[in-house]
Amino acid sequence: MRYRVEQLASSCDVSVDTVRYYQARGLLPQPEREGRVAWYGTEHAERIRRIRDLQGRGLTLAAAWSEGSWAPPMPTSPRRWPPPGGTTSPNS
């Protein structure tokens, strides 16, 4: 299935801004592009639902990332999390 960003957001019960925020934080892969149109797939929807489920259990986005090793590191300033080879908390 292919979704435009509005359809993806609606199907996952989140806002378009939330989809874009997750994407900017590296929690979602980039969509396929056809000209100016971005197409999202079922993997995007599943990932958003997984993130929302983990957040519903009280995990932060950083904890959701570490819980689901499927997502790339979330950038933080001034370093990237998690540190290479590190397993310490982002709050340390």
Image: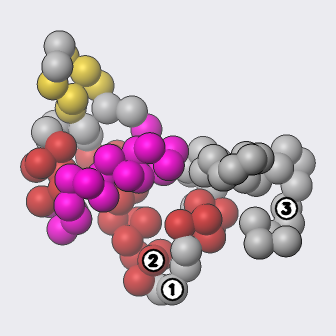
For the magenta stretch, what is the residue range? 11-29
Q: For mark 1, does the 10 Å Cα neighbourhood hold few (<14), some (14 to 19), or many (20 or more) residues?
A: few
- Residue at 74 percent of width and 47 percent of height: 78
> Residue at position x 85%, y 66% from top?
88
SS class, disc 1? loop
Q: Residue at label 1?
A: 58
Place residue 35 in its image quadrant.
top left
Q: Label 1 near label 2: C-beta < 8 Å?
A: yes
Q: Is residue 78 above or below residue 64?
A: above
Q: Is residue 30 visible to the viewer in this orientation of the structure?
A: yes
Residue 1 can be seen, yes or no = no
**In the image, what residue type sits under mark 3?**
Thr
Q: Looking at this view, is 79 or 49 the one in front? A: 79
Q: Residue furthest bottom?
A: 57
Indicate the position of residue 58 as horizontal and vertical percent values.
Answer: 51, 86
**Residue at the limit of the structure toward the front, as seen here:** 78
Local crowd size for mark 3, using a 10 Å CA cut-off: few (<14), some (14–19), many (≥20): few
Q: Residue 17, position in %: x, y?
A: 26, 54
| Left or right: residue 62 compared with residue 2 | right
Amino acid type indicated by mark 2:
Gln
Estimate the x, y position of residue 15 in percent, counting from the top left: 20, 61
Q: Residue at x 10, y 49 (%)?
A: 7
Marked residue nearer the N-terminal end (2 or 3): 2
- To which residue does mark 3 refer? 87
Q: Which residue in the structure is indicated by mark 2?
A: 55
3D distance between C-alphas at marks 2 and 1: 5 Å
Instruction: Using the rendered view, name the quadrant where residue 34 is placed.
Output: top left
Q: Is residue 24 magenta?
A: yes
The stretch drawn in magenta includes residue 34: no
Quadrant the N terminus occupies: top left
* Residue at x 59%, y 60% (from the top left corner): 65
Q: Secondary structure at mark 2?
A: helix
